[in-house]
Image (cartoon, rainbow, N blue to C red):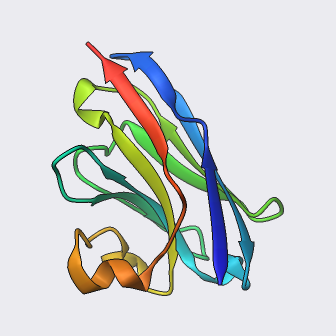
Amino acid sequence: QVQLVESGGGSVQAGGSLRLSCAASGDSSSRYSMGWFRQAPGKQREGVAAIDSDGNTDYADSVKGRFTISKDNAKNTLYLQMNSLKPEDTAMYYCAASSRPLSVFIYCSGGYCLSLYYWGQGTQVTVSS
């Protein structure tokens, strides 16, 4: 079991920045790939960014160049730095951990594959225009 607790969400104006954090604990969480998903009302959950145990990263096209994922292994904490935020970034953001490889980590929007992840409780990000 892996426990994930997010923090850092909030409300900002378009063009602003936020940094999300995810504290991980439990079953050797450092050996899992970790990442961020988001879900807006009425939409499917979508992968945003992921990082594997070697520090390799992957991003959704919609956030490339604006978001940066990183982790502090000593603190067992995952981060998502979000810059140049847009109203379409508004969503509940979820931290996730999984043994799925980095190449497919963010490519899961529903169904059975969601059960292959550990999830945090989510943190709301609201971007106003």
Q: Which residue is at a point 53% across and 34% down the rendered structure image?
A: 9
Q: Which residue is at a point 65% across and 77% down the rendered structure image?
A: 2
Q: Residue furthest right?
A: 74
Quarter of the figure with the N terminus = bottom right
Q: Residue furthest left?
A: 42
Q: Is residue 49 above or below residue 3?
A: above
- Residue 70: % across, % down: 59, 54
Using the rendered image of the protein, determine whether residue 44 is visible from the camera's viewpoint.
yes
Using the rendered image of the protein, determine whether residue 16 is visible from the camera's viewpoint.
no
Q: Is residue 56 above or below residue 30?
A: above
Q: Name the side, left or right, on which 2 lies relative to 100.
A: right
Foreground residue among 126 and 19: 126
Quarter of the figure with the C terminus = top left
> In the figure, residue 44 lies in which quadrant?
bottom left
> In the figure, residue 124 lies in which quadrant?
top left
- Residue 13: % across, % down: 38, 13
Q: Name the side, left or right, on which 52 lies relative to 90.
A: right
